Amino acid sequence: MMLYLIHGEIGMCANRLKQGRVYALRILSGWLVATLATAGWTQMPYRPSPEWRSADRRYATGGVFADLNNDGWLDFVVSNGNDMRRERVAVYYNTNGTLATTPGWESSDVGYHGHLAVGDINADGWLDVVVAVLLPQGGPGVKLYLNQGGTLSPTPSWASAVSFYGWYPALGDPDTDGDLDLAIGGFWPYGSGQTRHYIFFNRNGMLETTPSWQVTGIRDVAHMQFGDIDRDGDLDLVAAAREGNLIFRNQNGIISTTPDWVSTDNNRQFANTLALGDVTGDGFLDLIMSDNNQLTGGSGYYKLYRNLGTGVFESTPHWRYYDGYVSGVALADVNGDGHLDLAAGKWWGNVRLFLNTGTGLSATPIWSSAVQLVVEAICFGDLNRDGLVQATYTASAGQKLHYLGRQPIERILQVRVDGRTLSPAEYCYNLTNGWISLRDSPAQSLTVEYEYSTRLEMGVTDWENRGNIVFYHRQPGDVDGSGCVDDSDLLRVLFAFGQSGSALSEDLNLDGTVDDGDLLRVLFHFGAGC
Protein backbone atom coordinates (compact mmCIF):
# COMPACT_ATOMS: atom_id res chain seq x y z
CA MET A 1 0.00 0.00 0.00
CA MET A 2 2.84 2.40 0.91
CA LEU A 3 4.63 1.76 -2.40
CA TYR A 4 1.36 2.33 -4.25
CA LEU A 5 0.88 5.68 -2.52
CA ILE A 6 4.48 6.72 -3.19
CA HIS A 7 4.14 5.80 -6.85
CA GLY A 8 0.88 7.71 -7.08
CA GLU A 9 2.37 10.80 -5.49
CA ILE A 10 5.36 10.65 -7.85
CA GLY A 11 3.11 10.33 -10.87
CA MET A 12 0.98 13.29 -9.81
CA CYS A 13 4.04 15.41 -9.08
CA ALA A 14 5.70 14.46 -12.35
CA ASN A 15 2.69 15.72 -14.28
CA ARG A 16 2.68 18.95 -12.31
CA LEU A 17 6.40 19.43 -12.90
CA LYS A 18 5.91 19.15 -16.61
CA GLN A 19 3.36 21.95 -16.19
CA GLY A 20 5.95 24.03 -14.32
CA ARG A 21 4.70 23.34 -10.78
CA VAL A 22 7.99 22.44 -9.14
CA TYR A 23 6.77 23.50 -5.70
CA ALA A 24 4.71 20.32 -5.39
CA LEU A 25 7.82 18.18 -5.69
CA ARG A 26 9.54 20.24 -3.04
CA ILE A 27 6.71 19.50 -0.65
CA LEU A 28 6.85 15.81 -1.53
CA SER A 29 10.63 15.74 -1.06
CA GLY A 30 10.22 16.80 2.56
CA TRP A 31 7.80 13.95 3.18
CA LEU A 32 10.15 11.49 1.47
CA VAL A 33 13.12 12.60 3.55
CA ALA A 34 11.21 11.91 6.75
CA THR A 35 9.76 8.60 5.53
CA LEU A 36 12.77 7.08 3.77
CA ALA A 37 15.34 8.25 6.32
CA THR A 38 13.37 6.42 8.99
CA ALA A 39 13.65 3.29 6.86
CA GLY A 40 17.44 3.68 6.60
CA TRP A 41 17.40 4.41 2.86
CA THR A 42 20.61 5.86 1.44
CA GLN A 43 22.51 6.40 -1.81
CA MET A 44 26.22 6.12 -2.46
CA PRO A 45 27.99 9.34 -3.49
CA TYR A 46 30.24 7.92 -6.23
CA ARG A 47 29.47 7.59 -9.90
CA PRO A 48 30.29 4.19 -11.42
CA SER A 49 32.99 5.59 -13.71
CA PRO A 50 35.98 7.59 -12.43
CA GLU A 51 36.14 11.33 -13.09
CA TRP A 52 39.95 11.49 -13.06
CA ARG A 53 42.56 9.22 -14.59
CA SER A 54 46.31 9.75 -14.73
CA ALA A 55 47.74 10.21 -18.21
CA ASP A 56 50.91 8.21 -17.62
CA ARG A 57 50.83 4.42 -17.66
CA ARG A 58 52.79 2.58 -14.99
CA TYR A 59 52.66 -0.58 -12.91
CA ALA A 60 51.22 1.44 -10.03
CA THR A 61 51.10 -0.11 -6.57
CA GLY A 62 51.10 2.15 -3.51
CA GLY A 63 48.85 5.20 -3.36
CA VAL A 64 48.10 7.82 -0.70
CA PHE A 65 46.47 11.26 -0.68
CA ALA A 66 48.76 13.65 1.23
CA ASP A 67 49.49 17.39 1.25
CA LEU A 68 53.21 17.29 0.51
CA ASN A 69 53.73 21.01 -0.15
CA ASN A 70 51.56 22.28 2.74
CA ASP A 71 49.33 24.37 0.48
CA GLY A 72 46.16 22.91 2.00
CA TRP A 73 45.36 20.64 -0.97
CA LEU A 74 45.89 16.88 -0.96
CA ASP A 75 48.28 15.54 -3.60
CA PHE A 76 48.31 11.96 -4.93
CA VAL A 77 51.51 10.03 -4.11
CA VAL A 78 52.04 6.80 -6.07
CA SER A 79 54.79 4.16 -6.08
CA ASN A 80 55.32 2.23 -9.32
CA GLY A 81 57.05 -0.90 -10.53
CA ASN A 82 55.72 -3.82 -8.49
CA ASP A 83 57.24 -7.07 -9.80
CA MET A 84 57.07 -6.01 -13.45
CA ARG A 85 59.50 -3.19 -14.18
CA ARG A 86 61.86 -0.80 -12.40
CA GLU A 87 59.91 2.47 -12.23
CA ARG A 88 59.77 5.74 -10.31
CA VAL A 89 57.84 7.08 -7.35
CA ALA A 90 55.54 9.89 -8.52
CA VAL A 91 53.51 12.80 -7.13
CA TYR A 92 50.45 14.25 -8.88
CA TYR A 93 50.09 17.74 -7.45
CA ASN A 94 46.75 19.27 -6.55
CA THR A 95 46.35 22.94 -7.51
CA ASN A 96 43.32 24.59 -5.91
CA GLY A 97 41.29 21.41 -6.18
CA THR A 98 42.45 20.30 -9.62
CA LEU A 99 44.60 17.18 -9.62
CA ALA A 100 47.24 17.10 -12.37
CA THR A 101 47.06 14.06 -14.65
CA THR A 102 50.85 13.89 -15.02
CA PRO A 103 53.40 13.77 -12.19
CA GLY A 104 54.86 17.07 -11.02
CA TRP A 105 57.63 15.20 -9.22
CA GLU A 106 59.30 11.86 -9.88
CA SER A 107 62.14 10.14 -8.10
CA SER A 108 65.47 10.05 -9.89
CA ASP A 109 66.01 6.44 -8.91
CA VAL A 110 63.91 3.53 -10.13
CA GLY A 111 62.92 0.27 -8.51
CA TYR A 112 60.45 -2.58 -8.28
CA HIS A 113 58.42 -0.59 -5.78
CA GLY A 114 55.74 -2.02 -3.52
CA HIS A 115 53.39 0.06 -1.37
CA LEU A 116 54.15 3.31 0.46
CA ALA A 117 53.37 5.17 3.68
CA VAL A 118 53.38 8.89 4.46
CA GLY A 119 54.35 10.63 7.71
CA ASP A 120 56.61 13.29 9.21
CA ILE A 121 59.67 11.18 10.04
CA ASN A 122 62.08 13.98 10.96
CA ALA A 123 59.48 16.16 12.72
CA ASP A 124 60.02 19.26 10.58
CA GLY A 125 56.34 19.78 9.76
CA TRP A 126 56.55 18.30 6.24
CA LEU A 127 55.25 14.86 5.27
CA ASP A 128 57.87 12.36 4.10
CA VAL A 129 57.35 9.22 2.00
CA VAL A 130 58.46 5.67 2.83
CA VAL A 131 58.45 3.18 -0.06
CA ALA A 132 58.83 -0.61 -0.01
CA VAL A 133 60.97 -2.40 -2.60
CA LEU A 134 59.36 -5.67 -3.64
CA LEU A 135 62.31 -6.99 -5.66
CA PRO A 136 65.40 -5.46 -4.02
CA GLN A 137 68.00 -7.18 -6.25
CA GLY A 138 70.46 -7.16 -3.37
CA GLY A 139 69.58 -3.60 -2.38
CA PRO A 140 67.39 -2.25 0.44
CA GLY A 141 63.91 -3.61 1.09
CA VAL A 142 62.58 -0.17 2.06
CA LYS A 143 63.65 3.44 1.58
CA LEU A 144 62.69 6.97 2.59
CA TYR A 145 62.30 10.21 0.62
CA LEU A 146 62.50 13.20 2.97
CA ASN A 147 60.42 16.27 2.23
CA GLN A 148 62.64 19.29 1.61
CA GLY A 149 60.33 22.24 2.15
CA GLY A 150 57.54 20.96 -0.09
CA THR A 151 59.47 18.81 -2.55
CA LEU A 152 60.64 15.27 -1.93
CA SER A 153 64.33 14.51 -2.24
CA PRO A 154 65.04 13.13 -5.75
CA THR A 155 66.93 10.15 -4.34
CA PRO A 156 66.35 8.25 -1.09
CA SER A 157 67.47 10.09 2.04
CA TRP A 158 67.60 6.78 3.89
CA ALA A 159 67.55 3.09 3.02
CA SER A 160 67.59 -0.08 5.08
CA ALA A 161 70.91 -1.86 5.50
CA VAL A 162 69.15 -5.21 5.16
CA SER A 163 67.98 -6.54 1.82
CA PHE A 164 64.58 -8.24 1.76
CA TYR A 165 61.42 -8.37 -0.33
CA GLY A 166 59.28 -5.52 1.05
CA TRP A 167 55.61 -5.12 0.21
CA TYR A 168 53.74 -2.77 2.57
CA PRO A 169 55.32 -0.34 5.10
CA ALA A 170 53.47 1.05 8.11
CA LEU A 171 54.28 3.99 10.41
CA GLY A 172 53.52 4.17 14.12
CA ASP A 173 54.91 5.01 17.54
CA PRO A 174 55.15 1.70 19.42
CA ASP A 175 57.88 2.94 21.78
CA THR A 176 55.70 5.94 22.79
CA ASP A 177 58.43 8.57 22.37
CA GLY A 178 56.44 10.85 20.05
CA ASP A 179 58.12 10.07 16.72
CA LEU A 180 57.29 7.70 13.87
CA ASP A 181 58.86 4.25 13.60
CA LEU A 182 58.63 1.95 10.58
CA ALA A 183 57.27 -1.61 10.46
CA ILE A 184 57.49 -3.78 7.36
CA GLY A 185 57.26 -7.48 6.62
CA GLY A 186 59.21 -9.65 4.23
CA PHE A 187 56.95 -10.89 1.43
CA TRP A 188 57.55 -12.98 -1.68
CA PRO A 189 54.92 -15.75 -1.90
CA TYR A 190 55.84 -16.65 -5.49
CA GLY A 191 59.20 -18.04 -4.40
CA SER A 192 60.58 -19.75 -1.33
CA GLY A 193 58.96 -17.15 0.91
CA GLN A 194 60.28 -14.54 3.32
CA THR A 195 60.53 -15.25 7.05
CA ARG A 196 62.08 -12.09 8.54
CA HIS A 197 60.05 -9.01 9.47
CA TYR A 198 61.18 -5.75 11.00
CA ILE A 199 60.64 -2.55 12.96
CA PHE A 200 63.11 0.26 12.23
CA PHE A 201 62.96 2.67 15.16
CA ASN A 202 63.32 6.43 14.83
CA ARG A 203 66.50 7.72 16.44
CA ASN A 204 66.53 11.51 16.81
CA GLY A 205 64.63 12.19 13.60
CA MET A 206 66.03 9.45 11.37
CA LEU A 207 65.27 5.75 11.06
CA GLU A 208 67.92 3.27 12.12
CA THR A 209 69.34 1.38 9.14
CA THR A 210 69.56 -1.93 10.99
CA PRO A 211 66.28 -2.86 12.70
CA SER A 212 66.22 -3.25 16.49
CA TRP A 213 63.10 -5.44 16.33
CA GLN A 214 62.93 -8.57 14.23
CA VAL A 215 60.65 -11.58 14.00
CA THR A 216 61.70 -14.77 12.25
CA GLY A 217 59.97 -17.99 11.28
CA ILE A 218 56.66 -16.52 10.08
CA ARG A 219 56.22 -16.82 6.34
CA ASP A 220 55.33 -13.93 4.04
CA VAL A 221 53.94 -11.05 6.09
CA ALA A 222 52.15 -9.02 3.44
CA HIS A 223 51.04 -6.10 5.58
CA MET A 224 51.57 -4.92 9.15
CA GLN A 225 49.70 -2.07 10.79
CA PHE A 226 49.89 -0.38 14.19
CA GLY A 227 46.75 -0.09 16.31
CA ASP A 228 45.73 -0.08 19.97
CA ILE A 229 43.87 -3.39 19.89
CA ASP A 230 43.52 -3.79 23.67
CA ARG A 231 42.92 -0.07 24.39
CA ASP A 232 45.70 0.12 26.94
CA GLY A 233 47.17 3.32 25.51
CA ASP A 234 49.93 1.99 23.26
CA LEU A 235 50.11 0.71 19.69
CA ASP A 236 50.12 -3.04 19.11
CA LEU A 237 51.23 -4.56 15.82
CA VAL A 238 48.81 -6.50 13.60
CA ALA A 239 50.08 -8.61 10.70
CA ALA A 240 48.49 -10.44 7.77
CA ALA A 241 50.70 -13.40 6.84
CA ARG A 242 50.68 -16.65 4.91
CA GLU A 243 49.94 -18.77 7.98
CA GLY A 244 47.25 -16.47 9.36
CA ASN A 245 46.64 -13.06 10.89
CA LEU A 246 48.55 -12.15 14.03
CA ILE A 247 48.75 -9.67 16.91
CA PHE A 248 52.07 -8.75 18.50
CA ARG A 249 51.09 -7.04 21.74
CA ASN A 250 52.75 -3.92 23.07
CA GLN A 251 53.68 -4.04 26.75
CA ASN A 252 54.94 -0.71 28.09
CA GLY A 253 56.45 0.34 24.78
CA ILE A 254 57.93 -3.03 23.83
CA ILE A 255 56.42 -5.09 21.00
CA SER A 256 56.42 -8.84 21.64
CA THR A 257 58.40 -10.98 19.19
CA THR A 258 55.95 -13.87 19.49
CA PRO A 259 52.32 -13.47 18.43
CA ASP A 260 49.73 -13.17 21.19
CA TRP A 261 46.90 -14.13 18.83
CA VAL A 262 46.65 -15.99 15.53
CA SER A 263 43.53 -16.47 13.41
CA THR A 264 42.53 -20.09 12.84
CA ASP A 265 40.31 -20.10 9.75
CA ASN A 266 43.10 -20.42 7.16
CA ASN A 267 46.76 -21.23 7.80
CA ARG A 268 47.66 -21.10 4.10
CA GLN A 269 46.16 -17.75 3.16
CA PHE A 270 47.57 -15.48 0.45
CA ALA A 271 47.27 -12.28 2.47
CA ASN A 272 47.37 -9.01 0.55
CA THR A 273 46.20 -5.99 2.57
CA LEU A 274 44.69 -5.22 5.98
CA ALA A 275 42.86 -2.29 7.56
CA LEU A 276 42.05 -1.47 11.19
CA GLY A 277 39.02 0.45 12.43
CA ASP A 278 35.98 0.26 14.67
CA VAL A 279 33.54 -1.34 12.23
CA THR A 280 31.13 -2.75 14.81
CA GLY A 281 30.71 0.46 16.81
CA ASP A 282 31.80 -0.88 20.20
CA GLY A 283 34.85 1.36 20.59
CA PHE A 284 37.41 -1.36 19.78
CA LEU A 285 39.44 -1.71 16.59
CA ASP A 286 38.37 -4.53 14.29
CA LEU A 287 40.43 -6.20 11.56
CA ILE A 288 39.63 -6.24 7.84
CA MET A 289 41.91 -8.18 5.48
CA SER A 290 41.96 -9.61 1.97
CA ASP A 291 42.91 -13.26 1.33
CA ASN A 292 43.62 -13.60 -2.41
CA ASN A 293 43.11 -17.04 -3.99
CA GLN A 294 45.56 -16.72 -6.88
CA LEU A 295 47.89 -19.05 -5.00
CA THR A 296 46.91 -22.42 -3.58
CA GLY A 297 45.47 -22.05 -0.09
CA GLY A 298 44.08 -18.54 -0.47
CA SER A 299 40.35 -18.36 0.18
CA GLY A 300 39.38 -15.46 -2.10
CA TYR A 301 37.51 -13.64 0.69
CA TYR A 302 37.48 -10.19 2.20
CA LYS A 303 37.22 -10.91 5.92
CA LEU A 304 36.16 -9.05 9.07
CA TYR A 305 37.46 -10.24 12.45
CA ARG A 306 35.65 -8.53 15.31
CA ASN A 307 37.52 -7.34 18.39
CA LEU A 308 36.34 -9.34 21.39
CA GLY A 309 37.18 -6.50 23.77
CA THR A 310 39.83 -8.62 25.47
CA GLY A 311 42.84 -7.53 23.42
CA VAL A 312 42.31 -10.08 20.63
CA PHE A 313 40.09 -10.61 17.61
CA GLU A 314 37.76 -13.55 17.15
CA SER A 315 39.66 -16.51 15.70
CA THR A 316 37.42 -16.89 12.63
CA PRO A 317 35.82 -14.09 10.61
CA HIS A 318 32.38 -12.84 11.59
CA TRP A 319 31.78 -11.52 8.07
CA ARG A 320 33.27 -12.38 4.71
CA TYR A 321 32.61 -11.84 1.02
CA TYR A 322 34.02 -13.94 -1.81
CA ASP A 323 35.55 -12.10 -4.77
CA GLY A 324 38.50 -14.27 -5.83
CA TYR A 325 41.67 -12.26 -6.49
CA VAL A 326 40.94 -9.84 -3.64
CA SER A 327 43.49 -7.09 -2.99
CA GLY A 328 43.34 -3.53 -1.63
CA VAL A 329 41.02 -2.67 1.28
CA ALA A 330 40.39 0.64 3.05
CA LEU A 331 37.99 1.96 5.71
CA ALA A 332 36.28 5.36 5.58
CA ASP A 333 32.89 6.89 6.28
CA VAL A 334 31.81 7.44 2.68
CA ASN A 335 28.17 8.42 3.29
CA GLY A 336 28.60 10.65 6.33
CA ASP A 337 26.60 8.59 8.82
CA GLY A 338 29.45 8.29 11.33
CA HIS A 339 30.23 4.63 10.60
CA LEU A 340 33.24 3.18 8.78
CA ASP A 341 32.39 1.63 5.42
CA LEU A 342 34.61 -0.77 3.49
CA ALA A 343 36.11 -0.09 0.06
CA ALA A 344 37.57 -3.22 -1.49
CA GLY A 345 39.24 -4.06 -4.78
CA LYS A 346 40.51 -7.07 -6.65
CA TRP A 347 42.91 -7.93 -9.45
CA TRP A 348 41.19 -7.76 -12.84
CA GLY A 349 37.90 -6.69 -11.34
CA ASN A 350 35.77 -3.96 -9.81
CA VAL A 351 36.10 -1.66 -6.84
CA ARG A 352 33.28 -2.38 -4.39
CA LEU A 353 31.76 -0.58 -1.41
CA PHE A 354 30.16 -2.33 1.55
CA LEU A 355 28.01 -0.07 3.69
CA ASN A 356 28.25 -0.15 7.47
CA THR A 357 24.93 -1.10 9.04
CA GLY A 358 25.92 0.36 12.42
CA THR A 359 27.18 -2.91 13.86
CA GLY A 360 28.86 -4.49 10.85
CA LEU A 361 29.00 -4.58 7.06
CA SER A 362 26.35 -5.19 4.43
CA ALA A 363 26.24 -8.78 3.19
CA THR A 364 26.77 -7.70 -0.42
CA PRO A 365 28.29 -4.59 -2.02
CA ILE A 366 25.95 -1.63 -2.39
CA TRP A 367 28.12 -0.05 -5.10
CA SER A 368 30.54 -1.40 -7.71
CA SER A 369 32.63 0.52 -10.21
CA ALA A 370 31.80 0.29 -13.90
CA VAL A 371 35.50 -0.03 -14.72
CA GLN A 372 37.64 -3.08 -14.07
CA LEU A 373 41.31 -2.85 -13.22
CA VAL A 374 44.06 -4.52 -11.22
CA VAL A 375 43.47 -2.77 -7.90
CA GLU A 376 46.51 -2.42 -5.65
CA ALA A 377 45.75 0.43 -3.22
CA ILE A 378 42.64 2.39 -2.23
CA CYS A 379 42.86 5.71 -0.41
CA PHE A 380 40.49 8.47 0.72
CA GLY A 381 40.72 12.24 1.10
CA ASP A 382 38.94 15.49 0.23
CA LEU A 383 40.72 16.65 -2.93
CA ASN A 384 38.49 19.66 -3.58
CA ARG A 385 37.94 20.60 0.08
CA ASP A 386 34.16 20.73 -0.35
CA GLY A 387 33.39 18.76 2.80
CA LEU A 388 35.99 19.94 5.32
CA VAL A 389 34.98 20.21 8.96
CA GLN A 390 37.15 21.65 11.71
CA ALA A 391 36.92 19.68 14.92
CA THR A 392 38.36 19.78 18.43
CA TYR A 393 39.44 16.78 20.47
CA THR A 394 40.02 17.23 24.19
CA ALA A 395 41.33 14.94 26.91
CA SER A 396 42.51 15.26 30.48
CA ALA A 397 45.79 14.11 32.01
CA GLY A 398 46.89 10.60 31.20
CA GLN A 399 48.05 8.61 28.23
CA LYS A 400 50.10 9.67 25.23
CA LEU A 401 48.11 7.90 22.49
CA HIS A 402 44.78 9.38 21.41
CA TYR A 403 42.35 8.38 18.66
CA LEU A 404 40.59 11.54 17.48
CA GLY A 405 37.29 9.88 16.55
CA ARG A 406 37.52 10.22 12.76
CA GLN A 407 39.18 8.05 10.13
CA PRO A 408 40.80 9.31 7.99
CA ILE A 409 41.61 12.85 9.07
CA GLU A 410 42.78 15.55 6.65
CA ARG A 411 45.36 17.38 8.74
CA ILE A 412 46.39 18.38 12.25
CA LEU A 413 46.00 22.14 12.78
CA GLN A 414 47.28 22.57 16.33
CA VAL A 415 48.17 20.51 19.39
CA ARG A 416 48.13 22.07 22.87
CA VAL A 417 49.19 20.33 26.07
CA ASP A 418 48.56 22.04 29.39
CA GLY A 419 47.88 25.28 27.51
CA ARG A 420 51.13 25.22 25.50
CA THR A 421 51.25 24.74 21.72
CA LEU A 422 53.47 21.81 20.79
CA SER A 423 56.07 21.79 18.03
CA PRO A 424 56.09 18.95 15.45
CA ALA A 425 59.00 17.40 17.38
CA GLU A 426 56.73 16.78 20.38
CA TYR A 427 54.15 14.53 18.75
CA CYS A 428 53.50 12.33 15.73
CA TYR A 429 50.32 11.24 14.01
CA ASN A 430 48.74 8.93 11.45
CA LEU A 431 46.21 10.57 9.12
CA THR A 432 44.82 7.33 7.70
CA ASN A 433 44.02 5.80 11.08
CA GLY A 434 43.24 9.05 12.89
CA TRP A 435 45.53 8.95 15.93
CA ILE A 436 48.10 11.22 17.56
CA SER A 437 50.95 10.13 19.87
CA LEU A 438 52.61 12.56 22.27
CA ARG A 439 56.22 12.61 23.43
CA ASP A 440 55.14 13.55 26.96
CA SER A 441 51.91 12.79 28.79
CA PRO A 442 49.70 15.79 29.61
CA ALA A 443 49.76 16.84 33.24
CA GLN A 444 46.35 18.48 32.95
CA SER A 445 44.86 18.70 29.47
CA LEU A 446 45.22 17.97 25.75
CA THR A 447 43.51 19.87 22.93
CA VAL A 448 43.87 18.87 19.28
CA GLU A 449 42.47 21.02 16.48
CA TYR A 450 42.13 19.05 13.27
CA GLU A 451 40.18 18.73 10.03
CA TYR A 452 38.20 15.84 8.65
CA SER A 453 35.84 15.65 5.69
CA THR A 454 32.29 14.45 5.10
CA ARG A 455 32.86 14.32 1.32
CA LEU A 456 35.77 12.00 0.63
CA GLU A 457 37.19 11.28 -2.80
CA MET A 458 38.35 7.71 -3.43
CA GLY A 459 41.67 7.07 -5.18
CA VAL A 460 42.68 3.73 -6.69
CA THR A 461 46.03 2.62 -8.10
CA ASP A 462 46.13 0.28 -11.10
CA TRP A 463 48.86 -2.28 -11.83
CA GLU A 464 47.85 -2.88 -15.45
CA ASN A 465 49.15 0.29 -17.14
CA ARG A 466 45.73 1.89 -17.57
CA GLY A 467 46.25 4.82 -15.24
CA ASN A 468 45.34 5.53 -11.64
CA ILE A 469 41.79 6.73 -11.04
CA VAL A 470 39.77 8.92 -8.68
CA PHE A 471 36.06 8.73 -7.92
CA TYR A 472 34.86 12.14 -6.76
CA HIS A 473 32.32 12.45 -3.97
CA ARG A 474 29.17 13.84 -5.54
CA GLN A 475 26.04 15.02 -3.82
CA PRO A 476 23.53 12.14 -4.07
CA GLY A 477 20.71 13.08 -6.43
CA ASP A 478 22.84 15.67 -8.26
CA VAL A 479 22.40 14.50 -11.86
CA ASP A 480 24.03 17.44 -13.64
CA GLY A 481 27.05 17.72 -11.32
CA SER A 482 26.32 21.26 -10.17
CA GLY A 483 26.64 20.31 -6.51
CA CYS A 484 23.01 21.25 -5.85
CA VAL A 485 20.01 18.92 -6.12
CA ASP A 486 17.43 21.19 -7.70
CA ASP A 487 14.79 21.55 -10.38
CA SER A 488 17.21 20.84 -13.23
CA ASP A 489 18.02 17.42 -11.77
CA LEU A 490 14.32 16.59 -11.52
CA LEU A 491 13.82 17.61 -15.13
CA ARG A 492 16.79 15.50 -16.27
CA VAL A 493 15.32 12.40 -14.65
CA LEU A 494 11.79 13.05 -15.88
CA PHE A 495 12.77 13.64 -19.49
CA ALA A 496 15.01 10.53 -19.45
CA PHE A 497 12.32 8.48 -17.70
CA GLY A 498 12.06 4.98 -19.15
CA GLN A 499 15.39 5.05 -20.97
CA SER A 500 17.76 2.10 -20.55
CA GLY A 501 21.52 1.89 -20.85
CA SER A 502 24.78 1.31 -19.01
CA ALA A 503 26.09 4.89 -18.77
CA LEU A 504 23.07 7.11 -18.13
CA SER A 505 23.81 9.85 -15.61
CA GLU A 506 20.10 9.91 -14.73
CA ASP A 507 20.24 6.23 -13.69
CA LEU A 508 21.20 7.05 -10.11
CA ASN A 509 20.61 3.59 -8.65
CA LEU A 510 22.59 1.92 -11.46
CA ASP A 511 19.90 -0.63 -12.32
CA GLY A 512 20.14 0.10 -16.04
CA THR A 513 16.85 2.01 -16.34
CA VAL A 514 15.76 5.53 -15.44
CA ASP A 515 12.69 4.85 -13.34
CA ASP A 516 10.86 5.60 -10.10
CA GLY A 517 13.89 4.59 -8.04
CA ASP A 518 15.97 7.35 -9.60
CA LEU A 519 13.23 9.92 -9.16
CA LEU A 520 12.97 8.94 -5.50
CA ARG A 521 16.67 9.63 -5.06
CA VAL A 522 16.37 13.13 -6.45
CA LEU A 523 13.33 13.82 -4.29
CA PHE A 524 14.98 12.42 -1.18
CA HIS A 525 17.96 14.77 -1.53
CA PHE A 526 16.11 17.73 -3.05
CA GLY A 527 17.69 21.01 -1.92
CA ALA A 528 20.89 19.38 -0.65
CA GLY A 529 24.08 21.26 -1.50
CA CYS A 530 22.19 24.36 -2.64
Image (cartoon, rainbow, N blue to C red):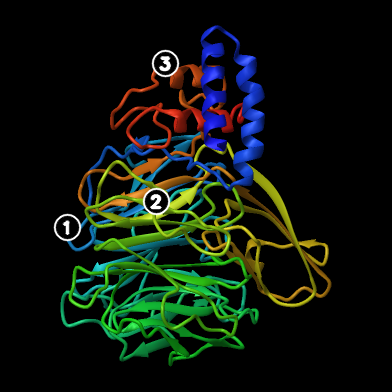
Residue at the image point whose x is 23% and y is 61% from the top: 82
x, y percent for residue 497: 40, 21
Residue at the image point whose x is 52% and y is 57% from the top: 356
Badge 3 amino acid: Phe
| Marker disc for residue 322 | none
The quadrant of the picture occupied by the C terminus is top right
Badge 2 amino acid: Val
**Up-down: is 41 above or below 298?**
above
Q: Earlier in the sequence, mark 1 or mark 2?
A: 2
Badge 1 amino acid: Arg
| Marker disc for residue 77 | 2
**Up-down: is 104 above or below 401?**
above
Q: Earlier in the sequence, mark 2 or mark 3?
A: 2
From the image, tell me which residue sits under label 1. 85
Q: What is the secondary structure assignment of the residue under circle 3?
A: helix
- Place residue 224 in its image quadrant: bottom left
| Marker disc for residue 495 | 3
Residue at the image point whose x is 44% and y is 40% from the top: 46
